[in-house]
Amino acid sequence: MKYFIAALFLPFLSGCWLTATNSSMPFGAAPLTVWGAGEAISYLATGKIMEDNAASFFTGKDCSLGRKLSGEGKYCMTTLELERANKPAWSVQKIYCYQSLAAPTCYTQPSPYPTDTLIGIYDKPVYPNQSDQ
């Protein structure tokens, strides 16, 4: 069905009438001017151009040419794909553990004392704080 609708509007993509000022558009404006104004209004209202909104409507996904061109993801993405793409990355912090009298003692930086016996260096995942978002 969506391909039928797309094929139905295909003849209107002809560029012959886009710059003619003697068309029946409001205030005698050229159709290309009206289309450009529509693009601007669509972008300011939704953050996407008219073609993105039409593609989103027909596919049921969130489509964005800006996301595709900036390399942030595919042109059309589901809500699950968007959540995964927007999830902040976690980092790794080095933990240095040393032998002590009772239990091992761990620090985020190496001990400056040469008498401390290093047990091991571990990688601790550090997740971003949810309140920072």
Image (cartoon, helix red, strand yellow):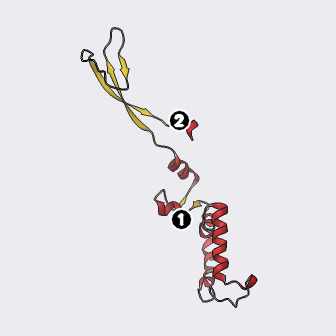
| Residue for point 53% across, 63% down | 66
Residue 32, percent across and down? Answer: 63, 81
Query: What label sits on residue 109 in the rendered view?
Result: none
Q: Is residue 110 above or below residue 22?
A: above
Left or right, 65 with reference to 98: right
Residue 14, percent across and down? Answer: 59, 86
| Residue for point 27% across, 17% down | 113
The residues bearing labels 2 and 1 have C-alpha atoms spaced at a distance of: 30 Å
The quarter of the image holding the N terminus is bottom right
Are there few (<14), some (14-19), or many (20+) residues within 10 Å of tag 1?
Answer: some
Q: Amino acid at mark 2?
A: Asn
Q: Nearer the viewer, mark 2 or mark 1?
A: 2
- Residue corresponding to mark 2: 129
| Residue for point 39% across, 35% down | 92
Chain-order first, disc 2 or disc 1? 1
Q: Amino acid at mark 1?
A: Leu
- Residue corresponding to mark 1: 65
